[in-house]
Image (spheres, rainbow, N blue to C red):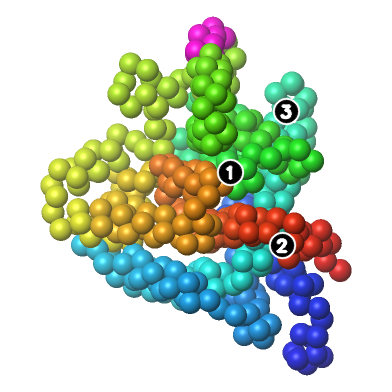
Amino acid sequence: MKLDEIIKIPNIKLKSLFSLLIAVNAIILMEPYFVWTTYHKGILTPLINIMIILNLIAMAVMIYYLGETVKMKNLFICGVFLFICVWQYYIGTLTTPGFSIGSLCIISTICLFILLDKETQAEAFRIFAWLFAIAILPSIIYFILKSIGVSMPMNILESEHIVKVATGKYYEQYFGGLLIVNPSAKEIRLCGIFDEPGVVGTFCAIILAAEGLRFKKSIRNVILLLGGILSLSLAFYLLLFIMIMQQAYFNGFKKTIRVCILAIAVIVLFFNIKSNNKYIKLIQNRFDFQSSAVIKNNRTNEGFNNVFEKFIEDKNSDFWIGNGYEASEKNDQMYGSASYKNLIYNHGVLGFLIIMAWLAGVAILYGGLNYNTIIFSSIFLISVYQRPYILKVPYMLVFFGALALIRLEEKSPSESKLKVRREICLKIS
């Protein structure tokens, strides 16, 4: 069958198929356990490159053959993103690797996604959110069963990361889900099909922010809420708290006061609980009210902080332009840590400000000035505190897809093309 004959298939069905492919690609690029080199000797590791190639072809077909109209606003946003990529790969005092075939494929994937129409972006986000909820559901079930003492057949899976191996952490691999085990702390936490509970907590919070914390008739959002809570991710709790406070503020002064009083009461009660429960202690120990930081950052270590403090104090040229792409990952004292400080150390204060300004500008241009955009974009930007991976494909899909969804619902909640397509996006024949 020729390509022009294939395109005669109703565009709405073909676009739904491509949206599904884009969402699946984003999940694969989050590196679930079945693409690890430690899983059956890396038998499925090539799936990452295969999905990237298929995804690039699909989006190129959508733009070129399906008559997509690329807007000047999208081209401008894409142009600034390319400037940021050049800064990342070519500017720095230590490492300037330049573009590789792999990096060009990732950059092209993001650029093509930016150029797609809002309906396709929003649909890809919706499918991604469903896939993510499905991906963490088995782990939620296993965690609950494990917590009440139910034994289940499982295998031991080793991490790909040197730091986790060095600290003795490993995974209990069940059918379709993982639980990460930390023998030194005698704790087990759920992490879906991913490598860390923080991945579950952060993405659950970001997706729920895009959805406006809507749970009525939404099984998916209930799963995401439950997954975020049971991940015991401090990031999830803090982002959820900020979302609730923001929604209360936008709903009026009286509601804000009521929510503040309730929140303070819950916090005071929780931190005064004397419990031997290891999970309650895990969360309580992440706070230090006698310290100016209040929240203990478990994403960095002493060596990382020492190197970063020296970097800030010296204020050499690298302070402004950074040390270069992945310089922190190549520093033995900083390896294994993750923080917004990575972005500053790698790309300098100027590079960090350019990235954050670009994201804020995209939020305004793409989502519009409304409280849904403000809530979502602020949660997304705050997540950078412990997740500096915002320019990766999964984060960019969520960022642009969620903003597109917000704008479509804001403009025409009853007539949006997306409303029609939501019902078929997971029923592609």
According to the image, label 3 marks what residue?
144
Dot 2 falls on a residue whose secondary structure is: loop
Magenta stretch: includes residue 270:
yes
Looking at the rendered structure, the kind of residue marked 1 is Ala
Q: Is residue 26 above or below residue 203?
A: below
How far from the left and from the top, in percent, is residue 15? Answer: 72, 72
The residue at which mark 2 appears reads as 416
- The quadrant where residue 411 appears: bottom right
Does residue 251 lie above or below 6 as drawn?
A: above
Q: Are marks 2 and 3 in contact (CB under 8 Å)?
A: no
Residue 210 in the image: state x and y as whole percent.
Answer: 60, 48
Numbered label attached to residue 209? 1
Q: Relative to residue 168, is residue 231 drawn left or right?
A: right
Magenta segment: 268-275
Residues at marks 1 and 3 touching, judged by CB atoms closer than 8 Å? no
| Percent x, y of residue 183 | 54, 27
Q: Residue at (59%, 58%) from the top-left corner?
A: 407
